[in-house]
């Protein structure tokens, strides 16, 4: 695939990954009280909910734009690892095991984005020149 094709695929990949975080962040806003209670039940302070919302929404928007994309990919990967370990580590529950594995699959995609970079169709790509 040529450079434009590669960059197009990376743009789609960034948007697909970002969509998960955007959807999740907006969902946390819509179910703010319930999510706060859930966080407290898992031993996390409810005061961290605004931080989680900010990380998800800001991270999603930055991924879509491709601004500081490598850093954002690593930060979101770390966020996914922490949330998997805090909220989805009940391996006797098949649903939680699925969410645990899903989080780590997302980490894999984010690490691949970290390695590849965001491509030319990004703010980073326009300022860095050719990858």
Image: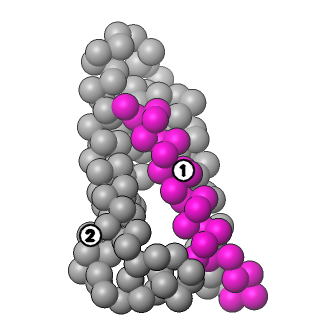
- Residue at image position (31%, 58%) is 54
Q: Is residue 14 magenta?
A: no
Decide: is 81 above or below 8. below
Dividing the image into 4 quarters, which one contains the C terminus? top left
Decide: is 63 above or below 42. above
Q: Secondary structure at mark 2?
A: helix
Q: Is residue 71 magenta?
A: yes
- Residue at image position (27%, 37%) is 65
Residue tagged by mark 2?
A: 26
Q: How is the image coloured?
A: one colour
Query: Cβ–Cβ below 8 Å for labels 1 and 2?
Result: no
Taking the view exactly as shown, the residue that stands out farthest to the right is 92
- Report the span colored magenta: 68-93
Q: Residues within 10 Å of mark 1 (few under 14, many from 20)?
A: many
The image quarter containing residue 100 is bottom right
Decide: is 32 above or below 17. below
Closest to the observer, 76 or 16: 76
Numbered tag placed on residue 77 in the rendering: 1
Taking the view exactly as shown, the residue that stands out farthest to the top is 129
Residue 126 shown left or right of residue 56 in the figure: left
Q: Secondary structure at mark 1?
A: helix
């Amino acid at each position: 695939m040529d450079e434009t094709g590669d960059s197009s695929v990376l743009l789609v990949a960034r948007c697909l990954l970002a969509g998960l975080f955007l959807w999740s962040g907006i969902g946390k806003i819509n179910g703010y009280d319930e999510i706060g209670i859930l966080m407290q039940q898992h031993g996390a302070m409810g005061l961290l909910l605004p931080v989680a919302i900010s990380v998800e929404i800001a991270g999603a928007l930055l991924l879509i734009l491709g601004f500081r994309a490598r850093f954002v990919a690593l930060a979101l990967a770390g966020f996914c690892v922490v949330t998997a370990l805090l909220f989805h580590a009940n391996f006797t529950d098949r649903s939680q095991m699925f969410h645990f594995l899903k989080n780590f699959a997302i980490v894999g995609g984010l690490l691949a984005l970290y390695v590849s970079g965001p491509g030319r169709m990004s703010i980073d790509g326009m300022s860095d020149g050719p990858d």
